[in-house]
Amino acid sequence: MRIASHPKFNVAKYDYDAGVAKVESPFVVSAFRKLIALVKAGEDAAAGEQVVVTGWGRNVVSYNSS
């Protein structure tokens, strides 16, 4: 398996916590594994279109101001 992280990933802030994994064999689609559609480069989601946002980083922003 090859994994490519986002070039701007910042481990301290978890900014750009996205990546792509290239696997050696296809996944079996099931109730727990589903395919998702990606927006093409240069396109935007239409106003009012339902989208899914996911990640594995922090879900609370907390910065120390001192």
Image (spheres, rainbow, N blue to C red):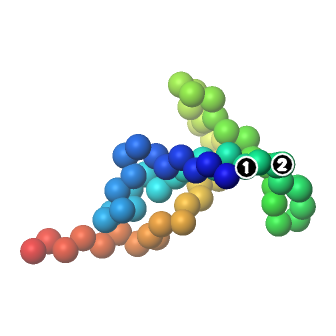
The residue that mark 1 highlights is: 23
Residue located 57% across and 28% down the image: 41
Q: Is mark 2 on a helix, strand or loop?
A: loop
Q: In screen coordinates, is 62 left or right of 30? A: left
Tell me the kind of residue under disc 2: Pro
Tell me the kind of residue under disc 1: Val
Residue that lies at the very extreme toward the left in this rendered image: 66
Provide residue 35's location: percent of width, then percent of height: 79, 49
Q: Badge 2 local density, few (<14 within 10 Å), some, or many (20+)?
A: few
Nearer to the camera, 59 or 56: 56
Nearer to the camera, 41 or 49: 41
Provide residue 50's location: percent of width, then percent of height: 68, 47
Q: Badge 1 local density, few (<14 within 10 Å), some, or many (20+)?
A: few
Vertical relation: 66 (above or below) 2: below
Provide residue 49's location: percent of width, then percent of height: 66, 41
What is the distance, in whole Å, between disc 2 and disc 1 at their CAs? 7 Å
Q: Is mark 1 on a helix, strand or loop?
A: loop
Residue located 59% across and 59% down the image: 54
Residue located 67% across and 39% down the image: 38
Residue located 89% across and 56% down the image: 28
Query: Quick one: quadrant of the C terminus?
Result: bottom left
Residue 26's tag is: 2
